[in-house]
């Protein structure tokens, strides 16, 4: 992946995480978008509660395909917006690559069952 596409992917993940964070916390999207990347998720600026944290993790799993609770048992990635975006970007790329490599469907055999 090129540096430009990595930056674009990270930017997209940042935007999506901020949207999900606003929904999980009830903080306005404009306020979340104004925040720098470093404030602590459980700190005073965002005030992520444990219930909102579970909601956020579930939404990330459902919409971005990264199961943070499984991938980061200590949940260190929940330190800040920045650490969360970095983690999701890194694991989203890895998950997609693994899915492609493990996919039972080969595009060259479209229309035929891989189980036949």
Image (cartoon, helix red, strand yellow):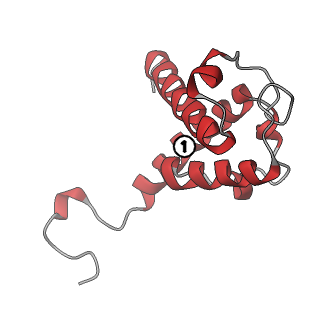
Q: Quadrant of residue 90?
A: top right
Residue 69 rendering spot, x and y as whole percentages: 73, 56
21 relative to 49, above or below? above
User: At x 74% / y 48%, what residue is drawn?
Assistant: 53
Residue 97 rendering spot, x and y as whole percentages: 47, 47
CA neighbours of label 1 inside 10 A, class few (<14), some (14 to 19), many (20+)? some
User: At x 69% / y 17%, what residue is drawn?
Assistant: 35
Q: Does residue 90 appear in the picture of this structure?
A: no
Considering the image in quadrants, where does the N terminus appear? top left
48 relative to 34, above or below? below
Considering the image in quadrants, where does the C terminus appear? bottom left
Residue nearer the viewer, 40 or 108: 40
Residue 99 rendering spot, x and y as whole percentages: 45, 56
Residue 63 rendering spot, x and y as whole percentages: 49, 49
Q: Would residue 60 appear left or right of 46 to someone viewing this image?
A: left
Q: Does residue 1 appear in the picture of this structure?
A: yes
Label 1 residue SS = helix
12 relative to 98, above or below? above
Q: Would residue 73 appear left or right of 109 to someone viewing this image?
A: right
User: At x 52% / y 55%, what residue is drawn?
Assistant: 62
User: What residue is pinned by disc 1?
Assistant: 92
């Amino acid at each position: 992946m090129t540096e430009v596409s990595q930056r674009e992917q990270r930017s997209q993940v940042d935007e999506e995480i901020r949207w999900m964070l606003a929904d999980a916390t009830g903080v306005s999207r404009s306020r979340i978008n104004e925040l720098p990347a470093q404030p602590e998720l459980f700190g005073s600026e965002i005030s992520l509660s444990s219930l909102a944290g579970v909601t956020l993790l579930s939404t990330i799993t459902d919409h971005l395909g990264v199961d943070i609770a499984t991938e980061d048992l200590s949940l260190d990635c929940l330190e800040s917006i920045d650490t969360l975006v970095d983690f999701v970007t890194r694991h989203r790329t890895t998950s997609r690559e693994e899915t492609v490599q493990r996919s039972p469907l080969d595009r060259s055999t479209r229309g035929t069952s891989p189980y036949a």
